[in-house]
Image (cartoon, helix red, strand yellow):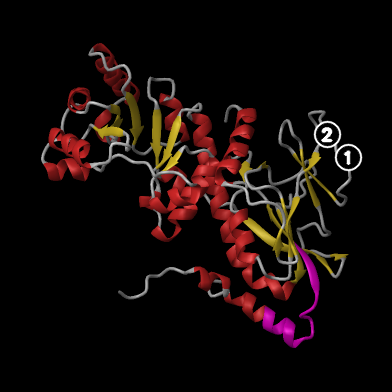
Amino acid sequence: MEKLFIADDKDVADGYTMDVYFERTKRILEASGLADVKVCAEFTGSSLPKGWDWAVFCGLEEVVRLMEGRPISISAIPEGTIFKPRSAESVRVPLMNIFGRYTDFGVMETAMLGMLCQPSGIATAAARVKIAAKNKTVLAFGNRRMHPAIAGVLDRSCYIGGCDGVSSRMGGDIIGKEPVGTVPHALMLLMGSNEAAFRAFDKIIEPEVPRIMLIDTFSDERAAALDACRIIKDLKGVRLDTPGSRRGSYKELINEVRWELDMHGFKDVSIIVSGGLDEKSISEIVDTSVSGFGVGTSISNAPTLDLSMDIAEKDGAPVSKRGKFGGRKYTYRCPTCFDMGVSLSPDDEIKCKCGCMMQMIEKEVMKNGKRVGDVRTPDEIRSYVLKQLKQIGEL
């Protein structure tokens, strides 16, 4: 097979995927005797997409892995932190700072930004869906809409943002969980009937895999749900994936299926819904008897955060391009309302407009090319996100 159009680890680490002007910049600096100039470069954003008020910082672990061994130091807000891009004074909040010779890390700007911008957008979309779901189960089903090369990044970001399960084996391995999923409509079509597909699944697939049957391929969903209950002894749930053009009111359809299940003694069989869901459509049906949601494109195709890397200090002196604030800055956040603050001192006292004292939240994660602190697991980061989402409460 000819090589696919994807980069491997070496391609990224060698700078093969970078914007070419960074390599040219490095050559110019080296030829001009400026290779040893040390800088502080900060990663910030000016605003958030779709009118979002906050975002989830995601992707830091991958940046640390990429930059290990290089003679640089990194400080950043913890991965999973809910942040706002600007302080009350409209100063862009540094999410990550890099210290060292520009020639030692400048060519990695493209990779580092990509590792933060897209995962943060995906994690934020997942977090917003989780809030809309009112803590009901959310499963990430968006891999089929994205390039397979980023399946692991996608699933990790979804999980950190609050999704309870992911669909790819690669994603499952990264987060340390078994991947989740039911079956595609293709199984029913090829088997010829719901009954044949239900029986084959139950006979062939390992018993530890939850029995959740897809019920809307051929017949009325209520009838198919009852068929699944009668055929599968240990049925855990049924899934509705009815296209919008055929389902009418999704809320009424869910209630009808629930009524039929309860009336025939199958009160323990859950209802999972999927098919074009997003935070808005989920909020419209979340108060029904639905137990969980399979969400795909609205999370996987989340808008990428528009972060940038800018030099804020050169050889210890403040410097910046027009429109940016110079000087090495420290990031503060209110522990109550999550408003942000920025200071030139790590020991400042900043009072939030809500009356609480802000906390300096950035931490050193790399010193002279070596990781500082323990590696945080996806579970630990996700728990941190969910704790903050509980404080936010509603969108």
Going by the picture, which residue comes out furthest to the front?
A: 207
Q: Is residue 168 left or right of residue 164?
A: left
The residue indicated by pointer 1 is 349
Residue 247 location, x and y as percent? 27, 29
Label 1 element class: loop
Mark 1: amino acid: Glu
Residue occupying image coordinates x 64% and y 56%:
307
Instruction: Tell me which corner region of the image, top left, top right, bottom left or bottom right, holds residue 20.
Output: bottom right
Instruction: Tell me which corner region of the image, top left, top right, bottom left or bottom right, holds residue 35.
Output: bottom right
Label 2 crowding class (10 Å Cα cut-off): few <14, some 14-19, many 20+?
some
Instruction: Tell me which corner region of the image, top left, top right, bottom left or bottom right, holds residue 12.
Output: bottom right
Relative to 99, residue 277 above or below? above
Q: Is residue 218 left or right of residue 315?
A: left
Q: Which residues are magenta?
A: 26-41
Query: What's the distance in space between the residues labelled 2 and 1, CA to CA?
Result: 7 Å
Relative to 95, residue 245 above or below? above
Residue 166 location, x and y as percent? 42, 44
Mark 2: amino acid: Met
- Does the residue at mark 2 contact the one at mark 1 (Cβ under 8 Å)? yes
